[in-house]
Amino acid sequence: MSDQPPLQVDGLTVAYDRRPVLWDVSWTLPRPCLAAVVGPNGAGKSTFVKAVLGIVPALAGRVSLFGQPPAAVRRRVAYLPQRESVDWDFPASALDVAAMGLYGRVGLFRRLTRRHREEALGYLDRVGMAGLAGRQIGQLSGGQQQRVFLARALAQEADIFFMDEPLAGVDKTTEAALIEVLRAIRDGGRTVVAVHHDLRSVPDYFDEVLMLNVERVAAGPVASAFTGETLRRTFGGRLETMAPASRPTAAA
Amino acid sequence: MPEALLDILAFQGGYNTSLVLLSTLLLGAGAGPVGVYILFRRRSLITDAIAHATLPGIALGFLAALLVGLDGRSLPILLAGAALTAALGALAVQWIRDKTRLAEDAAIGTVLSASFGLGIVLLSVIQNLPVGGQAGLDSFLLGQTAAMNAEEARIIGIGSAVVLALVTLGSRAFAAVSFDPEFTGSIGWSVRLIDLAMIALALAVVVVGLKTVGLVLIIALLITPAVAARLWSRHIATMALLAGIFGALSGYLGSALSASLPNLPTGGVIVLVAAAIFMVSLVASPRRGIVAAALVRRRIRRRIAMRQALAALERGESVARALRRRLQRHGLATRDGGLGAAGSAMLQRWRRDERLWHRYIVEHGTPPLDAYWSPPETILLPGVVAALEAAEAER
């Protein structure tokens, strides 16, 4: 079981109406790691994650997690959507949202007990949010909301975590805290696949990378796949418009 | 008349009236929580279309009952017809949205007006038929309980109780899908099924409420208690409970009022009670109400005035008498109107808070709620505050 690759994607293809969004993408993560999905806006990064999880229907391709179809290992999978995808004015507290991570185990109808609430509080504590557990989510800053989302994902106690821009729009302190949590997940023998927007930090944070622009441009260990050459082939002219510092010199 | 109203409210207005009162109370109790989820899942427009699409079904139910030799006024048959065309209306909206490039609101507008028009035409055809019993049909538009019998009240009461039980049972799923449908799908819960159940419950409220509230106003009984509850609560579960209470109160008071003033359409009175609850909430809600907002504005204004006054005292200038009095009341100015130690400390603290807030905004963008006039420690995490302080110290 544990020697099965956490993620195996073969020929994944998605189109919205007549517009291709992902074209024949294959990617394998042979062992537990921190993996980044990198590419310009509109490259299909979010769609890739959603298609792997079956939230968006794929026209073609096969996905297996730990050697099995995703539906068969649902409990071992956690998903952290983009922060902007939900309405944060929704009437819920940080603790309410973190407790959603237990729903997969608790089910639709069973009561949430005090033990469940304490469990959820424990996950908030792991992201430094225990002090704000009762706070209305709309009153939280962007970084705090991101921490709450991460707590909810942690509460799923999964073996593979799919995260859509977990570090987008957060302050430096939060980024450092969140990346510590991600490393702890990896060091516990579990896998994180994160859509990531900040090219500068890819070599520092991640072990594996998928360079995506509708097609797979490159994939593999960051040291060999994340180069000036693959960046140019992924981002084209758009790379030049970014700050010079965003071009990794060491990797190139 | 008021005595009669009190009797009715105390369930002493006769068996029939009391049964009607109870059934309307249950209708409101079920409609409230359903409305909460409808509101957050943005399904109120389509629910209104569903309500209007019941009218042709009522007319067809009447005709069908006549054809098989039954009484055209039989409530179960009329409601079955209403549910049928309402479901067809919902399907039509979905079909137009999926198969054409029209937006959902355009599809809703088309279906709503077309089905309502069809219903009106069928009703006037029925009015001219040489049969009896069609006189009460137009009461389904605005609701009328005056002529309701015990059997009908029982149907409505039981239907409402079932809705209430089902919406309570499904509350976790409905809340999850309203907040984060993608996450809900990712844990293996079918978003489609949950949405379908939600619309089915809305349809059930519409159909069960036809006789008392009427199809034109039933959307108000779903949405108004929910919106009022939103003003009071910060948790979806509390909000659903409150909306149920507000809805029950609207149904109970409205139907009692209408029973003591039988010429008024029941639906209108019920909805007016719901609207009154909403108005009171809008003014008085401690978090989002008009009074609360005015208090916050006053606090901010005072804070600015006091900070400016303290700064003026620090520069050795004098400040207006009223302002000086206020500072003295808070112990921030000495008796002779100078800047005391406490005032000086307060001014330093406020300046430090403002510096940290400004630093926060420079680095993270938009200020959070209550920024500037609250200390950063009460809003931000300790680590973030420490980082801001370190950055300030570096400067």
Image (spheres, coloured by chain):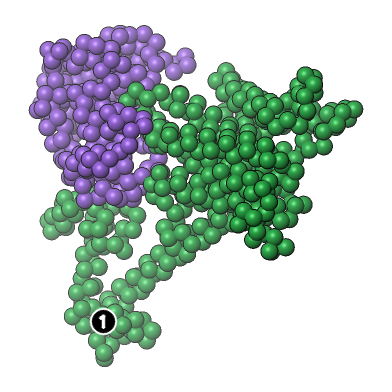
Chain colours: A purple, B green
Give the residue at x 49% y 42%: B33
Give the residue at x 63% y 38%: B154
Q: Tell me if mark 1 has few (under 14), some (14-19) or many (20+) residues whose alpha carbon lies within 10 angstroms of its own.
A: some
Left or right placement of residue A166 versus residue B220 in this view: left
Q: In which quarter of the image is residue B48?
A: top right
Which chain does tag 1 point to? B
Q: How many labels sit on residues? A: 1
Q: In which quarter of the image is residue B5?
A: bottom right
**B309 above or below B178?**
below
Q: Where is residue A131 in the image (x, y as percent from the top left)?
A: 21, 51
Q: Residue B267, can we see it?
A: no
Left or right placement of residue B199 versus residue A188 in this view: right
Residue beneath label 1, please?
B331
Q: Where is residue B141 in the image (x, y as percent from the top left)?
A: 72, 39
> Label 1 sits on what residue type?
Gly
Q: Position of residue A147 (x, y in %)?
A: 24, 40
Residue farthest to the right, as pictured: B130
The C terminus of chain B sits in image quarter: bottom left
Nearer to me, B371 or B17: B17
